[in-house]
Amino acid sequence: MEIRPMTITDYPGVYELWTSSAGMGLNNLDDSEEGIGRFLDRNPTTCFVATEEREIAGAIIAGHDGRRGYIYHTAVAEQYKRQGIGRKLAESALKALSEEGINKVALLVFNSNDGAKKFWEKLGFTARTPEEGDDVVYYNKALANITRIDT
């Protein structure tokens, strides 16, 4: 199993993975080849794929705006789950974001996706308690010691 930076040539396999994974929230613009190409141009070091003999086994799309990091899509193919691939992908993305000076990372998980919620919590992400009727849960994680200043 190899974890390496994602390139646009990985898009067909990554898109196939996304569309075969339950709990993904995709759309025809942001998640098109053109949309992901723009994202990779802006975030060339923070998106990763896991490959097994040239097959896409997993992928993570992460980036930042210079201030905060965001994880958008994380998926592992069914036959490769429970092998630590998701953890390795997440750790790779978090390390890359930290190396770019990002101190805090956020992500959204569908409230109905219990497996994803448990996964991110095991990696140290904290959930903001969703309100009644919310369909997503907001998670964040500090990558450095942060002192909160509320006014």
Image (spheres, grey):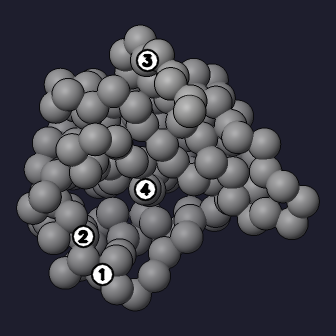
Q: Nearer the viewer, mark 3 or mark 1?
A: 3
Q: Which callout, 3 or 1, points at the residue further toward the start of the chain? A: 1
Q: Which callout, 3 or 4, points at the residue further toward the start of the chain? A: 4
Q: Nearer the viewer, mark 3 or mark 4?
A: 3
Q: Is residue 57 visible?
A: no
Dots 3 and 2: beta carbons under 8 Å?
Answer: no
Q: Kindly identify the residue that appears in the image at 84 percent across and 55 percent down.
A: 131
Dots 2 and 4: beta carbons under 8 Å?
Answer: no
What residue is disc 2 on?
Answer: 36
Dots 1 and 2: beta carbons under 8 Å?
Answer: yes
In the image, what residue type sits under mark 4? Answer: Tyr
In the image, what residue type sits under mark 3? Answer: Ile
Q: Residue 59, how many percent across, how many down?
A: 36, 50
What residue is disc 1 on?
Answer: 32
Q: Which callout, 2 or 4, points at the residue further toward the start of the chain? A: 2
Q: Could you tell me which secondary element the residue under label 2 belongs to? A: helix
